[in-house]
Image (cartoon, rainbow, N blue to C red):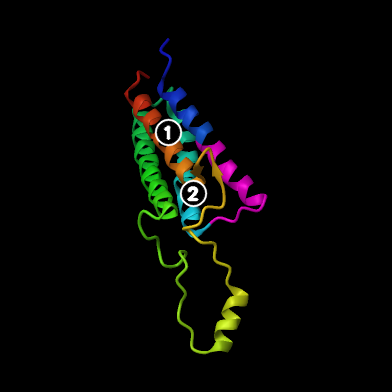
Amino acid sequence: MPLLTLQRAALAILFLAFATISGAWIFEFVGYAPCDLCLKQRFAYYFGVPLAGLTAVSARNFPSAARAGLWLLTLVFAGSAVFGAYHAGVEWGFWPGPTGCTGSAASVGSMDDFMKQLQNVQIVRCDEVALRILGLSLAGWNAVISIAMSALAIFGARAKA
């Protein structure tokens, strides 16, 4: 029996993706508020976790559907890796990030409007790292983990049913 099958690849991606998004939720729960780019990076996981589950379930009876699911997971997590690398680059100052979360302020009409806006708006900056683990920010780790899942999906899609 081969080491990597369609089902094993999908289950591994399911486990890794679910563990990664769960870790993000735990960090948020303990007080690390996500920025706008962090929240957008989660979309790949919200799509990828159920897709990996469906792919794993379909692998035994519908191998062609499972193979298509793994190719789609390849694209989802390759895109996630690119987006994570973009965010990490913003954090390192390699390129500018979106103006909505990198410190630029919207214009206001009067000082009273500005004071009201300050009381209601809480912006978490996308260009400041809240936490580094082994030298990488969470955005950097998202890029690394997404590359691994994308590669796993490629190898799984090329494996025998």
Q: Secondary structure at mark 2?
A: loop
Viewer-proximal residue among 2 and 107: 107
State which tag comes first along the sequence, 1 or 2: 2
Q: Mark 1: give few (<14), some (14-19) or many (20+) Cα within 10 Å.
A: many
Please say whether residue 7 is one of the residues in the magenta stretch: no
Residue that mark 1 sits on: 149
Cα–Cα span, label 1 and label 2: 14 Å
Q: Which mark is residue 42?
A: 2
Q: Name the residue furthest right.
A: 30
Left-right relation of 119 to 51: right
Q: Is residue 62 above or below residue 121?
A: above
Q: Mark 2: give few (<14), some (14-19) or many (20+) Cα within 10 Å.
A: some
Q: Secondary structure at mark 1?
A: helix
Q: Quadrant of residue 144?
A: top left
At which x and y percent is residue 15? Answer: 53, 32
Viewer-proximal residue among 98 and 76: 98
State the residue at coordinates (45%, 71%).
104
At which x and y percent is residue 44? Answer: 44, 46
Please say whether residue 21 is one of the residues in the magenta stretch: yes
The C terminus sits in image quarter: top left
State the residue at coordinates (40%, 45%).
80
At which x and y percent is residue 64? Answer: 33, 28
Q: Is residue 20 above or below residue 9?
A: below
Viewer-proximal residue among 9 and 60: 9
Residue type at mark 2 is Arg
Q: Is residue 57 visible?
A: no
* Residue extent of the magenta highlight: 17-34
Q: Is residue 119 above or below residue 126?
A: below
